[in-house]
Image (cartoon, rainbow, N blue to C red):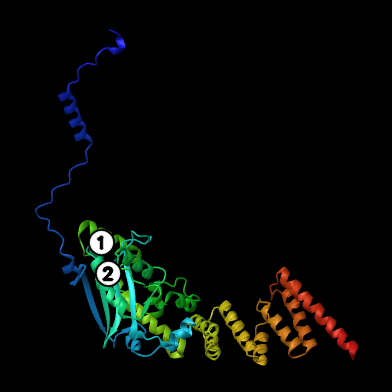
Amino acid sequence: MDEDRRPLPKMDVNALRARLNTLRGRHAPPAPAAPSPSETPPAPVEEVLGLQPHTTEAGVCLVRETRLPLSTRYGVAPLAELQRPHGERIARLLRAPAWRTFDFRQALFLDTETNGLAGGTGTFAFLVGVGFLDDDAFVVRQFFLRHPGEEPAMLAALQPLLERFDTFVTFNGKSFDIPLLETRFVLARRPLDLRTRPHLDLLHPARRIWRWRLTHCDLGTLERQVLGVRRAAEDVPGWLVPRYYNDYLRTGNAAPLRGVFYHNRHDIVALAALSVHMATIVADASPALGLAGADLFGVARLLEEGGHWDEAEAVYRRALQSQLPHALRREALKRLSLLFKRRQRWEEAAALWRAMLAQGDLFPYEELAKYLEHHARNLPAALAVVQRAFHDAREGCLRLNRAEREALLHRLARLQRKMEQANTDE
């Protein structure tokens, strides 16, 4: 028989099976330890967090409601201000006349907590907090998912509130909370148009006002540095919230979520307080409010850009009477002088430009020289300002780059020609 076609030796199947069983036992993961008889399962989440069941046509979700009397002050802001008409003030804050009809009583304050911060269809809101006025109270209602399968019920419970109110108030909600919720409604096959609703997103006007003093303009920083509120130790940092919820899903232990509910509830109340505070300061930045000089500058600039020049002038003056960093004081003087120039209040503008000379900036020399040349018709005085600019540059009181120096030389030559021509005409 051909050697290559000899039959294979007979395999001992029983021995092979025994060997495989041995290998499986060697590499298998350890079996989970049996629970100790002394261990008790975690308490139900409803009990731990004080939640109540809410039945909808899509199932049951859990809700917690907190009512704050409107006599409550949240830092510097009284919640009773939510009852007053603030449409004109919010229109001024947003530089949008269409907001003159806005009413906080028709607004829904909203903030979500999610299972992740990356976005995408895998991100969902496990806790949605809303706030609204109800008679003599500010109500905070929090909707919670024990597990992702309850999302249709939560959305069904949330939808009537989203449809009841005219306007959303959020902090960065235009970019995050509202698109997220709209996506979840679509995925749940109950599409709801949320992005086209009027939306007061406080992030953007807050940055315009407070970026001159605060490095960060997140809601937590504004709550501490502007409203004057310090949260209790039980608060959970926003970046930890997803981890706490995912741990709860894995272990069933809801106790750490107490801090998440605390965090969400205070975010909602902070939204309401910050809203009325911002409406107040753009209407009357009076000394009684105790605003920092940099904050006054931010309010004045916002008012100026919105065309409220009388109010902007008053707040710029108040800012200049307060403690301001040198660079910000110079910027306030500059903007106030340009406001005078825009309104053709030349003498007041020129007085500011003269006060700003020798402070390192070419701006007042140029503006004063232009005024003297074209409006006061005083060529010798205009020439003297340009010559002083070169003198101050040599003395180190004025910094000039190459383009600025060339522009100043061009102005100097033109003024000298004009004066020569004027002397010739005489």
Numbered label attached to residue 155: 2
**Where is mark 1, residue-wise?**
148
Report helix, strand or loop for mark 1.
Answer: helix
Which quadrant of the view contains residue 385? bottom right
Q: Nearer the viewer, mark 2 or mark 1?
A: 2
In front: 178, or 346? 178
In front: 129, or 225? 129
N-term-proximal mark, 2 vs 1: 1
From this view, report whether residue 62 is shown above or below residue 307. Answer: above
* Amino acid type of the residue tagged 1 in the rendering: Pro
Residue at (70% x, 85% y) in the render: 368
Name the image quarter holding the N terminus.
top left
Pointer 2 with pointer 1, Cβ within 8 A: no
Residue at (72% x, 77% y) in the render: 392
Which quadrant of the view contains residue 40? bottom left
Q: Position of residue 111 (x, y in %)?
A: 33, 72
Pointer 1 local density, CA inside 10 Å: few below 14, some 14–19, many at least 20: some
Residue 207 visible in the shown view: yes
**Residue found farthest to the left:** 37
Q: Position of residue 294 (x, y in %)?
A: 50, 80
Give the CA separation, mark 2 to mark 1: 12 Å
Numbered label attached to residue 416: none
